[in-house]
Image (cartoon, rainbow, N blue to C red):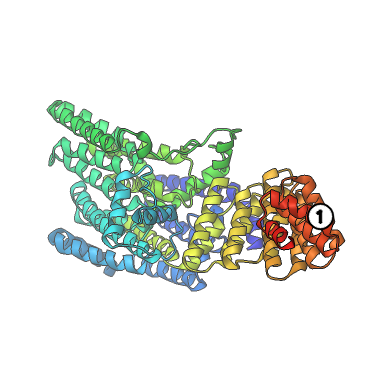
Amino acid sequence: MNEVIGLDRLLAPTLYSVLFISFFSLILGAMNGNVFKYSIIFGICLIALYCFGYFYPVSLTWGFHFLGLLPNYFFVMYLFGSVLYLLFIFTKTGEHFVVKSARFMERRPWKFLSLVTGVFLVATVLFKVKAPLLGDGFFLVRNFSEAFRGISPLDLRNEPLATYYYYGFTLVFGTSTFEGFLRAFWIAGGVSGIAFLVCSFFIVRNLLVDATTQLITFLFVCTASYMQLFFGYVESYSIVLTVISLYLLCSILYLKQKVQFIWLALCFFLACVLHYLSVLLLPSLFYLMVHEWKERGIKQILVGTLLIATGVSIILLLAEFSIENLHAYVPHKHYLTVEESTEVFEAYSQAYTLFSMYHLTDWFNLFILLCPAPLFIIGLSLFKWKTIAWKSSVIVFLLFLIVPFILFTFIAKYDLGAAKDWDIAATFFPPIVLFACFIFFHAEIVESKKIALILLGISVLNSTMWFTLNARTDSAIARVKVLMDPRNVSHLGHYATSLHLAMYYHQTGNHSPAIDIWKEFSKKYPLDRRGYLNILQNINTVNNHDYKEMKEVYESWVRIDSASRQTIEGFSKFCIEAGNYYFEHDQPAQAKVFYHRATELTPQFARAFNNLGSVYAVQESTAHAITYFLRAIELDSAYADAYYNLGNAYYDSHEKALAKKYYEKAAHLGNSFAQESLKESQ
């Protein structure tokens, strides 16, 4: 990996420039030549891109580096599968199979849908997420666990209804263990996934006429990388994706004059309550409102508006009109700034600026992960501009839906980094896929179906590699570690990712690796005290009394942050605690080391001198003991224990008058041992 990291610095300015130029070169070539030939070249380029990711599995290739994090035989299988599929499509057998499947879908839709659902359920088992490290799932698991036990309230964040959806599954299954929470999310994702398949099926049935194009479009929609959300993904986005698809279905049916406008308002409200980001659907709803007003008047619009207003009022009433109960406050902005910010929280939460090469790199990776083929066929369709009915209500509606979302993906700041927060954007990608297929199959492109099938097969292979990686614990962990790069992940993202990874290790009972995670974090952010505190906490978890290793951590911390009084005092208190442990376990030499260090760190800390004196007293070095007891009393004239210990030292030195004097002082200050000693001497 060291050689890779060295070359890694050249990736951003070179690789993505090549990708950008190649993409448009292929589009321009297709405009002026054989579309089919250039489509095959693009498909081969996609395969080559994944092969490139195999050799360079770094943070800047996160949208296609999966083969590099899987065992080597997956790379061979990928190449073999790609060649085999291309050969299959070019044969008459392949063409016959597709036509036959399309006829089956057209003539026996329910049997077809049942078969697809069965395949999906098998996929949820095969590709079930093993390590929930993709997003912010550990926050949900912890919050659900605490809410389940009545320790804290359910945190609705910015997705109230989605939170209740998943929390409901944990209640139904009586979840109390980490594995139980994973199972509950897996089942909840499977249920929402089946609903997504049903919605997508009826969308393509109403969107396109030809059976083969319906099948191809349906497969494009239901095999893209965002399907990962349904495979046990521990986050709340699978149900959001499903309800957005429901909104799409109702909108298409509305434009086909099969449902009334009120259903659109209901779906929009439901999507927004599931996750506030669904407000990006609003421009498309406004377009449909204008369409309704022109076609049928204002009645249904008023009813829909009243429905939304009533729903909002009920939610506010349930939340006691406290916005704080329905909103997760963060001290930083949710969008990228054009220039580097001098504000503390902005600098903490932002890895790069809006027009940084690393931001563009992340943006390209997001689209490469989720819809490279649909983007290409959109490009192919554009050169047949005149053959597409751009004034079609379906196309205009989809554009009003897609454009705000694409703008959002460009300006959004991802707290965990785009590679881990990909799920936020993923819920809006099915409309892009639908839009691409719709205009492509209306663009009168020669051999459009074969082109689409070639790109579909390659896309399915790529998605399968993504699903496989997340279904393997070792590969998923390796990917998370690769993604922790300061160039495209903020300080906040590093801390959250380190925390998630450490929590995973703890949940699986493998505590030791968590120490290395926090050590790596502290190397990158040496002034962040949380890194050192987590190292110490994790060392304490692995070995409750490994004070020597903990002292080394403190020493390195103090060397870096010597100006922090809080750090110095924390180290000193730790030394007292460690010294006490060794003193109580008859290891005075070890205790002396820690007590001495405490006196060096905090020369005004009376307790450190008193305890150090106690060690010397045990070692029968009475003169040294008296010196340290006197120093403790000098620092704190009301320190009863120091007076008592000093009395003992003088007593051992056969200076009973002085001993009595200090016993009396200690007894006066409330020391019970001194009081007993005075009673015995009377």
Q: Position of residue 240 (x, y in %)?
A: 31, 48
Say which quarter of the image contains residue 517: bottom right
- In the image, is residue 588 above or below residue 278? below
Q: Which residue is drawn at the image coordinates 18% and 29% (left, top)?
A: 301
Work out whether residue 445 can be spotted: no
Task: Give, as a three-letter code, the residue at label 1.
Answer: Tyr
- In the image, is residue 6 above or below residue 305? below
Q: Position of residue 299 (x, y in %)?
A: 13, 27
* Other-residue count near label 1 (Cα within 10 Å), few / some / many at <14 / 14–19 / ≥20: many
Name the one closer to the observer, 247 or 561: 561
Work out whether residue 519 can be spotted: yes
Q: Position of residue 246 (x, y in %)?
A: 23, 47
Q: Position of residue 282 (x, y in %)?
A: 30, 34
Q: Which residue is drawn at the image coordinates 70% and 49% (left, top)?
A: 668
In the current view of this chain or complex, which residue is farthest to the bottom? 73
Q: Which residue is drawn at the image coordinates 35% and 65% (left, top)?
A: 180
Name the one closer to the observer, 22 or 617: 617
Name the one closer to the observer, 402 or 143: 143
- In the image, is residue 375 above or below residue 122? above
* SS for dot 1: helix
Residue pointed to by mark 1: 628
